[in-house]
Image (tube, rainbow, N blue to C red):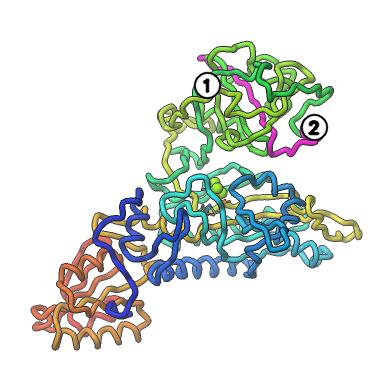
Amino acid sequence: MKMSKAYIPTLKETPSEAEVVSHKLMLRAGMMRKLSSGIYTYLPLGQKVIQKIEEIVREEMNREGAQELLLPALQPAELWQESERWNDYGPELMRLQDRHDRDFCLGPTHEEVITDLVRDEVRSYKDLPLNLYQVQTKFRDEIRPRFGVLRGREFIMKDGYSFDVDEAGLEENYQKMFDAYDRIFDRCGLDFRPVVADNGAIGGSESHEFMVLADSGEDTVVFCSECDYAANLELAVSDVKFVIGDEEKAEIEKVETPGVDTIESLAKFLDFPESKLIKTLAYQTEDGYVLALVRGDYQLNEIKLRNLLGAPNLEMADGEELLDDTGVVTGFAGPIETSGEVKVVADPSVMEVVNGVTGANEADYHYVNVNAKRDFDVDEIADIREIKEEESCIYCGGDLTLTKGIEVGQVFKLGTKYSEALGATYLDNNGKAQPMVMGCYGIGITRTVAAAIEQNHDEYGIIWPAAIAPYEVSLLTLGDGEVLETGQELYQNLKSAGIDVLFDERKERAGVKFNDADLIGASVRITIGSRSLAEGKVEVKVRSTGDDFNIKVDNVIDKVA
Ligand code: ATP
Ligand code: MG
Ligand code: MG
Ligand code: MG
């Protein structure tokens, strides 16, 4: 591509709305422009990087036997009502109506649509396993769209779904996808780690996130230096006043729940969506009580909670007889008698839940219509980092470190949550209908572009990992006549050699060309000037190291290829 023809509108000044470096550089390098909050146009340079990443993703997905399809972005509400997510997904779901006042949404994810497809098509165990994926635009009305494409409201995702006859099959597919993700992010040249993750609103059992390590990351990840324990701590800690026992709160309703002894039986008893149940876990530490508030579908593991609290010897608070085997306090709301200050560890999504259910400090009773934000007096959310720094790993005693990470991908074992809700069954070899066992696998394509920049830049611009660079080579001519002619020739030769080259043949000052080349971040810069050309040479500069040397024009192709 010739720079004089290319639509790469670089900017000298940093746009004021951009807080993080990738956002700034993507705007400055002319990769994208903002249309509206969290909604971006990808210009040719941005689109090129997106395509390179997509290509790597496709190759590695296909290598594991996954097959690409394309599902609709526009989805009827009925499907989401069947899975009960029309309500549960909350305000992040972009909803709209057609001319007949029928409800639709713009897909934030595609479990419902793919399960609907497969339930109509797959009959027998002989049709399974199946692993299908797509690369598509997703819509999420994020509460705080920010950091450019790191958290957009419209973004590109690769999402994949596997269907198996049993857990063993799912395990196999999960492992394949895990390995594919490892190779994808490796090939993209990223410094990343897979970490144990929570399942959030999607539900299911096991999950890992792929985290790109970067200070601008919104997630906090804990690593052990000795063993391979690595986990996301998607929890926030705060000191709160514990007021749930206050029955004066008009909206809280106390209901009798005889015989209910697990969170699941409670959900059934109250006919309450499990995802909205607030699990209350009460622990006693040296400093007093700790109450953990987590959503019903939230897999809070005790190890993580201990690490988080920096209290390896947590003891359950009073009322142990009311604990189920996961340590969930089901009969009451924890240490209610300590009506003063207790520490609350809360899954941030709990704060968003309206109409939660929690124990009522009394066997066989629960409170319904509990709102964590309203009924638990949460002041400020402390940074987990502060209380965690000198913690040791509870598996091996090794040092733990906390790092910020950007979640670029996640793999989930969904199990039968969606296949049961939507009736996606197959006939086993006894002719009996069984729910398919599902997994789902996402990669944020556009987020990966930004994450790569967060990790690979300097004060002058982007330093692309070679595999995803929009251009491998920036070729600059400083002058015309023989310089320009040599440039034209070299440009053709580089292209013939299959090298992606951006040829800056503009009549611009050297400084302008150098600045643009550094900003755009091709791996190698080749400069042709009259002085070195007099010796038959050109200057080659490696963007990442800054190393430069002069080589003979004739040797360029060999050297660069
Ligand atoms: P986050 O925790 O950052 O909100 P998520 O867990 O909600 O992400 P998933 O549902 O796991 O996201 O979606 C799969 C992938 O899609 C994520 O790993 C991430 O890379 C990407 N992604 C999710 N939300 C956004 C967004 N708002 N903008 C850009 N990419 C996103
Ligand atoms: Mg999210
Ligand atoms: Mg997440
Ligand atoms: Mg996720």
SS of the residue under disc 2: helix
Identified by mark 1, the residue type is: Val
Let me know if residue 558 appears in the view: no
In the rendered image, residue 66, in percent from the top left (x then y), is placed at 63, 66
In the rendered image, residue 93, in percent from the top left (x then y), is placed at 61, 51
Residue 399, above or below 10? above
How crowded pointer 1 is (Cα within 10 Å; few <14, some 14-19, many 20+) is rated as some
Residue in the foreground of this view, choosing between 347 and 313: 347
State which quarter of the image contains the N terminus.
bottom left
Which segment did they paint magenta? 267-287
Identified by mark 2, the residue type is: Leu
* Residue annotated with mark 2: 270
Judge left or right: residue 139 versus residue 483.
right
Residue 343, above or below 66? above
In the rendered image, residue 415, in percent from the top left (x then y), is placed at 72, 49
* Residue annotated with mark 1: 240
Residue 97 position by quadrant: bottom right
Q: Kindly identify the residue that appears in the image at 58 percent across and 17 percent down.
A: 284
